[in-house]
Amino acid sequence: MRHVVDARGSFCPGPITELIKTYRKAQVGDEIELLATDPAAKSDVAAWAAKSGNEIVEMKEEQGYIRMIIRVSSKSK
């Protein structure tokens, strides 16, 4: 299942907070698509994924925002 989190216009810690809320409801194997305009979201999500054992499938700049796709590989908190 793919979950979409639109955090465009939200600044730190908004995007990572919204990502974690969705992650807590997701199942292993799900993907979370995070849309963010805050440049800090890239490093925040990378650090969170490394710490939590989840996989960043894609991270790219779109037209005025960042699209990140995270695969839920682990359900650690």
Image (cartoon, grey):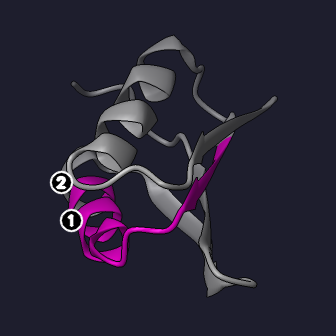
**Residue behind mark 1:** 47
Distance between mark 2 and mark 1 Cα atoms = 6 Å
Does dot 1 land on a helix, a strand or a loop? Answer: helix
The span shown in magenta is 32-49
Left or right: residue 52 versus residue 33 is: left
Left or right: residue 75 versus residue 47 is: right
For image coordinates 21% across by 47% down, the residue present is 13
Does dot 2 land on a helix, a strand or a loop? Answer: helix
Residue type beneath disc 1 = Ala
Specify whether residue 43 is painted magenta: yes
Residue at the limit of the structure toward the top, as seen here: 25
For image coordinates 30% across by 55% down, the residue present is 11
**Residue behind mark 2:** 51
Q: Picture coordinates of residue 3 (x, y %)? A: 72, 32
Few, some or many residues within 10 Å of mark 2 (<14, 14–19, 20+)? few
Q: Is there CB contact under 8 Å for labels 2 and 1?
A: yes
Q: Picture coordinates of residue 24 (x, y %)? A: 41, 17
Residue at the limit of the structure toward the right, as seen here: 1
Residue type beneath disc 2 = Lys
Specify whether residue 40 is painted magenta: yes
For image coordinates 61% across by 74% down, the residue present is 65
Left or right: residue 52 versus residue 70 is: left
Q: Nearer the viewer, residue 61 or 9?
A: 9
